[in-house]
């Protein structure tokens, strides 16, 4: 979220004091992230200890904090567990939000700096540890399972119908409608191909494992001393391992290497594995379709002139540029035929 939510800082501070036992001196909103349901803050106590505060509204599964805590306790050092309340719970309630507290890590994401060879290898090793961890069912029994649903594909079709039926006075919405009309055939082809691949996967389901489902370069945090962390576990799902592996070598893994180098170094750490190329192609298409739906929904959902809507439109357009995510998905799809 790039814009501060309508929640007074004083109420957040009171929650941190009463529920977590923090003696907060300062708090400031951080305009970070693409998730419109998540706002983050940095707070500092009177003894000058910094903390990272995450406010999450909408869908929340306790596994999003319980699983990282388990994995961290199990020795996966690339995970930052949330800190408990005074009663031992890993989150607090504040109006429509869940309040989640972390130690503050000063660093940058994988698109703000160049990852080293060793960091890429370490990332692969950590993902393999996660994929093979024996996480108790009691922590994950509420998580969804991949069903290759047409929900997002149908949602994008609905948006395409809407832009034909409406005239938009809001400048950003009008700009979006013009852009989507120029890309209609391309978008419908993406939807068609994702549906074909989904049907193919349904006939012979790959093995399901616990997946992060959003482990791209923006969710890699590199501390100033080079320590690497994997963050943002709100999207956990049981799915084929390709749900996570799709981010490797498709332009979403961060800066510093060619796509071929990125893939080679990751699998040097992850280890040899049989990849289902059909699943990889499906997930790369489906990720683009989900992005189109969510960006368009956000842009069409209001007429404010805030940075979140502007960023959404700019990012949507970027995906259609040469050698970006759509082109890379098509290239992989050719190899899976």
Image: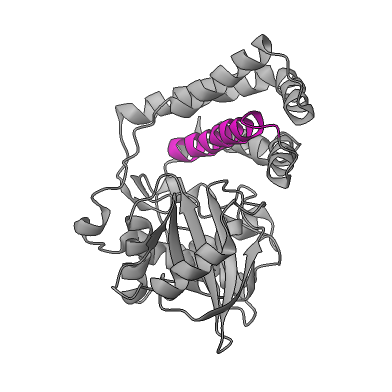
Towards the viewer: 48 or 189: 48
Q: Position of residue 76 (x, y in %)?
A: 39, 73
Residue 295 appears in which quarter of the rendering?
top right
Q: Is residue 203 above or below residue 61?
A: above
Q: Is residue 248 left or right of residue 80?
A: right
Q: Residue at x 36, y 59 (%)?
A: 131
> Any magenta on residue 302?
yes
Q: Is residue 107 left or right of residue 317?
A: left
Residue 78 shows up from this direction = no
Q: Position of residue 239 (x, y in %)?
A: 35, 44
Q: Position of residue 87 (x, y in %)?
A: 28, 73
Residue 336 shows up from this direction = yes
Q: Is residue 2 above or below residue 14?
A: above
Q: Residue at x 23, y 50 (%)?
A: 141
Q: Is residue 253 left or right of residue 181?
A: left
Over which residues does the magenta segment extend?
A: 278-303
Q: Position of residue 196 (x, y in %)?
A: 46, 22
Towards the viewer: 274 or 320: 320
Q: Is residue 128 above or below residue 315?
A: below
Q: How many marks?
A: 0
Q: Residue at x 68, y 13 (%)?
A: 166
Q: Is residue 108 left or right of residue 275?
A: right
Towards the viewer: 319 or 265: 319
The prevailing secondary structure element of the residues shown in magenta is helix
> Any magenta on residue 188?
no
């Amino acid at each position: 979220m790039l814009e501060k939510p309508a929640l007074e800082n004083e109420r957040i501070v009171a929650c941190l004091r009463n529920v977590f036992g923090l003696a907060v001196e300062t708090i400031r909103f951080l305009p970070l992230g693409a998730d419109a349901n998540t706002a983050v803050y940095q707070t500092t106590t009177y003894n000058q200890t910094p903390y990272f505060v995450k406010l999450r509204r909408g869908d929340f599964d306790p596994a999003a904090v319980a699983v990282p805590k388990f994995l961290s306790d199990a020795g996966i050092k690339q995970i930052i567990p949330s800190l408990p309340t005074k009663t031992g719970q890993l989150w607090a309630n504040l109006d429509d939000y869940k309040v989640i507290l972390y130690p503050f890590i000063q660093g940058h994401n994988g698109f703000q700096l160049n990852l080293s060879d060793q960091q890429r290898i370490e990332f692969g090793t950590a993902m393999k540890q996660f994929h093979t961890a024996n996480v108790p069912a009691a922590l994950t029994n509420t998580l969804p399972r991949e069903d290759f649903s047409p929900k997002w594909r149908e949602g994008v079709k609905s948006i395409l119908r809407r832009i034909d039926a409406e005239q938009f006075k809001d400048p950003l919405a009008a700009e979006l409608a013009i852009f989507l009309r120029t890309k209609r055939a391309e978008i419908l082809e993406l939807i068609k191909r994702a549906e074909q691949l989904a049907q193919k996967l349904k006939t012979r389901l790959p093995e399901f494992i616990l997946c992060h489902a959003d482990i791209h370069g923006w969710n890699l945090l590199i501390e100033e001393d080079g320590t690497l962390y994997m963050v943002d576990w709100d999207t956990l799902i049981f799915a084929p391992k390709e749900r996570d592996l799709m981010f490797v070598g498709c332009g979403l893994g961060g800066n510093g290497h060619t796509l071929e180098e990125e893939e080679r170094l990751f699998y040097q750490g992850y280890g040899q594995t049989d990849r289902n190329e059909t699943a990889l192609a499906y997930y790369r298409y489906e990720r683009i379709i989900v992005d189109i739906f969510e960006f368009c929904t956000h842009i069409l959902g209001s007429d404010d002139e805030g940075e979140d809507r502007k960023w959404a439109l700019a990012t949507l357009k970027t995906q259609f540029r040469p050698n970006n995510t759509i082109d890379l998905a098509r290239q992989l799809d050719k190899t899976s035929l």
